[in-house]
Structures are given as C-alpha cells and as structure tokens.
Amino acid sequence: MTEQNNSTEHPTIGISVVTLFPALVMSVAGSGVTGRAVERQRLSLATYNPRDYTTDTHRTVDDRPYGGGPGMVMMAEPLEEAIDSALEENSAQKDALVVYLSPQGQRLDHNLVCELAQLPGLVLVAGRYEGVDERLLESRIDREISIGDYVLSGGELAAMVVIDAVARQLPGVLGHSDSAKQDTFAGTGLLEHPQYTRPEQYRGMQVPEVLTGGNHEDIRLWRKKKSLERTRQRRPELLAQLELSSEDRRLLQEIEVEKTDRSDN
Ligand SMILES: C[S@@+](CC[C@H](N)C(=O)[O-])C[C@H]1O[C@@H](n2cnc3c(N)ncnc32)[C@H](O)[C@@H]1O
C-alpha cells in the first residue's frame, strides 16, 4: 500500500485505488485542490497494486479471454485480494463503496459526485487491458461508474477524475467556501457566468462595465442573466429541468427582447 496522509485526525473521506499504476494515481495528491484536500486531512489516499497479491514469479495479473479474442483480461483473484486489503487496512473504509471504473457504468455527473463525497470511504478499481473478469464484478463491485462515452486505456485517469471532483465538494478544501456552490451544475443547476480578471482591456476587448462598477446587486443580476443565457444556448435541456423563479423568468424575457433587437438591427 502507498499512503498519502500522516494525519491522526479522521479524514472526511478515505479513498483507496486498486491499480497497476500507483504512481500515476498518487500524482493527484501532489498538487492543486486534491493536494490541498490531502494536506488539510479531508482526504486520505492510498493505492493497492494487484501485483502485490500474486503468488507466481512473474506476478501475473492477466490472462487470455475464454472463448478467444484479442487482448488480455484482468484476473479476479489479485483484484479481490487488493480490494480486501483496502477494506481491512483503512478503518474509514469499512463501509466503503467499491466502485469499478468502466465505460459501461453509470455516467458521472454532479449529483453522483455529491453523493460520493458524502461517503466515509471509496475503493476505486481501475481496470486495464480488455477489462476485468466478470465474476469479480458480480461478487465484489457495488457500482460501476463511467466518466464518459469513450474508452480509455485504463481506469486510472477515470479514478483521478472522481477523486478531483469529490475533493472539491469536501468541506474546507476550496479557498473560498462558496466556490464549489457557484460552479457550473452546482447550486443553481445553471452553467456558470463568464469570468474576467486583469487587465481591464485585453487586445481591444473591455471587461463588462457592470463588473467594475462596484454595485453588488447589479453584478449579481448580470451574472444570473449570463448564466441563464449560456445555459439556454449551450445546454437547453438543463434549463428545462429547473424550477425558474420570477426573477429568472424576467431575465429570460430580457434576453429574448435583446436577441430580437439584435436580429432586427
Ligand atoms: C480498454 S478499457 C476496456 C474496455 C472494455 N473492453 C469495454 O469495451 O467495455 C480498460 C479499462 O479502462 C477503464 N475505462 C475505460 N474507459 C472508461 C470510461 N469511459 N470510464 C471509466 N473507466 C474507463 C476501465 O477500468 C477498463 O477496464
């Protein structure tokens, strides 16, 4: 096991990753928000390599598929023993959810991330090759999660995506406590408004005046309007799912009028 938390305090969530590439996964603990989550003892991260649970000299973890076909399949036993070690060694993980990262799983979204962030522990199993012996999935996996409709070469990057997204939701991890709530998909369910920083003029483009005017209510309304406009343009299906306030409806009407005015001119 490789571990990245020397804390005596109980972390908010303990995540173990079963992987053939522990260094790749542990790199997520070295910088940025996930690094801070580990440092602030909100997240403990450990890896378990199935090769450490083999008995032959070649430390074999894969074999040819029954019935023939290309590629290799990960054997159930080393994976099962790695999962068992993760569950036994990490007390936070007694009630951990055991997840197999898979292109065939439930698609990861904001709601699922928030659900995972509430758990005391997660064991993330990263597959390689053509995947994992189905009997391991049937007997030891609670849930399969996909990070999108495409196929990666291994589950490590998917596990790192889950770790990063979960870390953002843990209390005390982000610099400003409201940051995660303002993110796209969070809080309002809308896409986030556009952001600007210095300089005020960039290649002839000016920061919208309202943002430099210092009127907080005007800024709030401008941001809300931009969020509504963006969501309607880019992800109309998200807008259709929301219960709109009277303010939202008024702002959407304004957007509609402005659009008509623009096309008339
Ligand atoms: C090359 S893939 C195997 C794909 C498998 N043959 C299939 O068609 O379903 C190897 C590993 O990458 C991981 N993986 C690939 N795509 C993924 C995705 N979209 N989300 C999560 N994990 C993925 C899984 O752990 C999988 O076992």
Image (cartoon, rainbow, N blue to C red):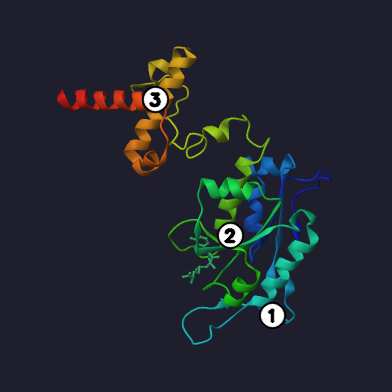
- Say which residue label 2 marks: 156
In the picture shown, does residue 223 fall above or below 98? above
Quadrant placement of the N terminus: bottom right
Asked which quadrant contains residue 64, the reply is bottom right
The residue that label 3 is drawn on is 246
Q: Which amino acid does label 3 sit on?
A: Ser
Q: Distance between the residues labelled 2 and 1?
A: 22 Å
Q: Can residue 167 be seen in this view?
A: yes
Circle number at residue 58: 1
Relative height, residue 50 to residue 155 (above, below): below
Query: In front: mark 1 or mark 3?
Result: 3
Give amino acid for label 1: His
Tell me which numbered mark, 2 or 3, is placed earlier along the sequence. Answer: 2
Q: Position of residue 156 (x, y in %)?
A: 58, 60
Q: What residue type is labelled 2?
A: Glu
Q: Nearer the viewer, mark 2 or mark 1?
A: 2
Distance between mark 2 and mark 3 Cα atoms: 45 Å
Residue 32 visible, this orientation: no
**Looking at the image, residue 81 lies above or below residue 106:** below
Counting residues from the start of the chain, the first of labels 1 and 3 encountered is 1
Q: Residues within 10 Å of mark 1 (few under 14, many from 20)?
A: few
Tell me if 189 is positioned left or right of 21 in this view.
left
